[in-house]
Image (spheres, rainbow, N blue to C red):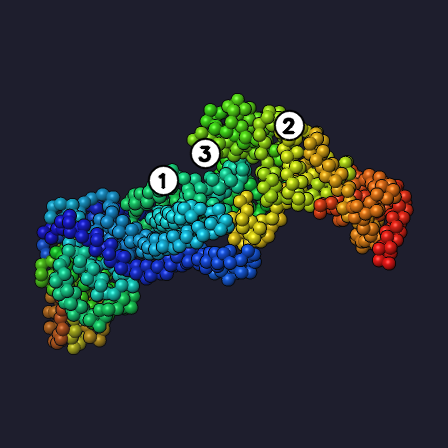
Amino acid sequence: MSLTVNNISKKYGDFTALRGLSFELKEPGVYALLGTNGAGKSTAIRIILGMLAKDSGEVLYNGAELDPIKEKVGYLAEERGLYPKCKIVDQLTYFAELRGMKKTEITKAVDYWFDRMELNDYRDKRANQLSKGNQQKVQLAAALIADPQLLILDEPLSGLDPVNSDIFKSIINEQIAKNKYIIMSCHQMPVIEEFCSDITILHHGEAVLQGDLNEIKKSYGRVNLAVKCDGDILPIAAECGLEPTEITPELVRFKIKEEEQAKQLLKKAAAADMTIVRYELREPSLHEIFVEHITRADNAAKEARL
Amino acid sequence: MTDTTSERTGFFGKYFLFRLKSLRPRMVMSLIMSLLTFPLALGSALPVLDTLCDLVKEQNELEPSMLSNGLAILTFGLIAAAASLIILLFMLITAPSGSFVYYAKKECADMYGALPLTFSQRFWADFISGLGATLVPFIICSGASCAFVPVLCGKNDMLVELGFSNFDSAKLATAYFQVLLTVIIALIAAYAIATLITVCCGSGGISILFSFVAVGMVPALAAIFSNTLISHCAGVDMTEHCMSLLRALPPFGTLIADAVTLRPTPAEPLSLICALIFIAAVIIGAYFLAKRRKAERTGEQFVYNAAYHIITVLLLVGAFVLMANIVGSVHVSDQGLYIGVFIFLTAAPLLFFELGHYRSFKKMWRSGIKYAASLIGSIALYGVLVSTGGFGLQYSLPNAEDIDNVVLSTQDSFYNSLEARFDDPEQIKTVLDINYRIIDCEAGTNHTSYPHTTITYTLKGGGTLTRKYYTYDDMTDTLGPIFSENKPITLPILDKAEKGAAYINEISVPSEGIVFSSIPDSDVTKELIAAIKEDINSGAGGDYIGTMTFSWPTDIMSGANDPTNMYILDERISSALRALDSRFSFMIREGYTHTLDAVKKLDKDALQLESATITYANRYEYQSAEWEENGYNTDLSLDISSGSELSDDPDMQKLLGLIAFYPDVNAMTNGTRETDNKRYDGNTKIVVISSYNSINNFMYIPDEKQEEAMQLISSLYEKQQKLYEEMYS
């Protein structure tokens, strides 16, 4: 299976929501769409699902234009859109029927998902009687009930408490284990780092960074150094040309330009007979990469205007 | 992984059933309202008819109070039915905003958009489920209420046998089904229009608001434009043609016409077909607009701005045309005020809506252009309507060869009327020619007076066309030659009087000294009517010299066995229960020699004085319209029976010889009228009332002969007293 998004663009009047977005899902896993608010993530998702007409480009599924009605695609929308006055057991059953499941399968699946989502106490409640978090769980169940191969999750963890977040994460892991193809749009960087292999960062409708997350991080190199020792490390760091970015009782953090600086610091600390309690050298976080790219893009845009 | 076509068809069914299930509360509400419409209305008529049948069978006399309970039930039933129907209409107008909620809410758009349904499947399922949830209960309940119809027909038949009503049971049943069909079509039309508006709007509140505006606008514009069209066509009767125009615009137009006239009349089949085509066009338009709709515009006020502009412009044009109608009918000095009020009433709401639409004052210049263009366009449209006589409608007359017969009647300001029917092709052409000449004179006339000339064409195809002209000139002279060609003249009131359903209430020919009131004698009436007919058929004319007034009662009791009875239970029942006294005046012309001879003979017979009362009338001051003393009294009364000694007394003969001046009795009693330019100033004191065969003849003694008359009366009175003394001694 493969999903290919080729050069899709979308304008709302004079405003360009998407400009030439392309990406591909070749292997099972989670593909992340990141971006600031209004970057075009939801627009891209709606174009893939056929809910919005694209101005140009194509969305290919296994080499052919994607027909979301024919192909079973599970979709978790960002907003709550359940039928407010219908019981959730009826709604879940209905969604399962619409996905072509047989009655016996439906009963089993509905029971399974009510258990999995810990919603058994709410089976006969109407949707408008549930909290937003519980509605979100019902919508996720509706997206997964037919066991789709392609899953699109738009802000799946927004508004969830830690317990429900864990439930969602475990479900996503299960889907990954089942070799599903998942597109996830999310603001929470730790979540992306936890699940996603490939990312696209969107800013003002354009992709400012795309690729495998690990490789992106590697390309930055290990530039974050965190040190804790029993003495004052700052003078030694200054000798190495390092300025601290964060000083806490626990740690001192430095941004290094190359690993050699980190090694020098370690040598000099050892030479000064200081005990290193903690020494951590790692790649930048996704959050840092994200902020850096967005800032760079904004600065470039400002310079272009000037 | 992929679905087959049959599976997708099944998905449509599942979606449709699920949507219908989610509309259960609406269906229950609709069922309750539906039971309160036709079933309640028909059911509430049963007690009235039951009571009526029983009363008529058992009693001859009928008092309105006997039906008060039944009428109260019927009135309640009709009001509740009308209110419930209006609620159902509101439900249908608001239904699309619920069925197509995803057009207004983005979160629903995502949810619905992700369902494995094609656009067509989703649209039709939502459309049909929304319509069905409200309409199906109504159709079921109204269909079930058909069980009442045979019962009502049976009771109606009973009344017809009793001579009580001329309302056909078959017509009753047909009228019911036709009204029901029209109502159903109207409800579907309202839903279709509301769906179209919902598709064009992106906000729930706006779609509901403009749905009401659009649905209400259709019949309102139909009424305004049909009224405007007709009011500027000389000869085209406002009410009749407005109603017929409205009936040609079903379903709303038909319902308005039925509600105004309280008389269900079916729309023409062709008009109904046109209405269905219109509805189909609206639905298909909604479908294709929904298909092209941009999902990203969900939440905006109007997805298709053209819909907003079309609605607001049509509202403005309708308002301006209405303004032109009203302003044209008021006094010139008041026109400025009306125009100012209308400008305010149209500009203020437009400003409100435009501000809400544009959300900014910067684009309001467009609103100004729209307003000005609508105003200018409306004035231009109105001007064209007026100058062309309703786009030539007033000149729309049938061709002579298409006419089977024509009835021409004319009536002057004294309600004197002549009527004739023509079958001869040459005379039909003559009447057509007169019609065109009347149109040329009538074009632009302000229709404020009673119609004087009515021409009704019966076509060979079976239809009729009527034109009524408010001619100021007395058309009897113009039409005299046609009437005098030995063609039979019909005057419905004369036929009525001949059959005894009307009586002559008063005859007054002052120049001949004749004033009679109340001639109930049927033989006398027939003689008079025969004389009138002879004069009319002879084409006699001349000045008006007198009046003959007919009256007929229209209460149920007297009409129970009257074949010419005109009141009918299918009119407003309350008015049918009131005793009405209708009057019809016929002017006697100088040339009506047969009529005058018959009246004079009656007058001469009256002077036989079967009995006579001579009494004083008080002095009447015309200028101040006051009596000197309190009205008419009988200070002195002299009873003279025919055949008595005094009837041949010379003093009596002299007294009768003094009677030469016969003012209008009404002027004497209420001092409000002037006849033949004679005024009743002075000292008219003596009124002679003779009665013969119950005919009261008012005779008066001229002022200059009062003294002599008083002396004769005194002498006669003394003689009578002596006779009484001799009689009783």
Residue that badge 2 annotates: B538
Q: Work out which quarter of the rendered image holds the C terminus of chain B and state it.
A: bottom right
Residue ranking furthest to the top:
B426
Which residue lies under the disc numbered 3? B463
- Count of marks placed on residues: 3
Q: Is residue B21 above or below residue A64?
A: below
Circle 1 chain: B
Q: Residues within 10 Å of mark 2 (few under 14, many from 20)?
A: some
**As drawn, A299 above or below B370:** below
**Above/below status of B635 relative to B676:** below
Q: Nearer the viewer, mark 1 or mark 3?
A: 3
Horizontal arrangement in the rendering, residue A103 relative to residue B370 (left or right): left
- Please tell me whether mark 3 sits on a helix, a strand or a loop: loop
Q: Earlier in the sequence, mark 1 or mark 3?
A: 1
- Which mark identifies residue B273? 1
Residue in view at x 40 percent, y 48 percent: B173
Q: Is residue B141 left or right of residue B14?
A: right
Select label 3 or label 2 by which is in front.
Answer: 2
The mark nearer the N terminus, 3 or 2, is 3
Residue B251 circle label: none
Residue A145 seen:
yes
Residue B320 appearing in the image: no
Residue A209 lies, in percent from the top left, at: 19, 53
- The chain to which mark 2 is attached is B
Q: Which class describes the residues within 10 Å of circle 3: few (<14), some (14-19), or many (20+)?
A: few
Residue B232 falls in which quadrant of the image? top right
Q: Residue furthest bottom?
A: A230
Q: Contact, CB < 8 Å: mark 3 with mark 2?
A: no
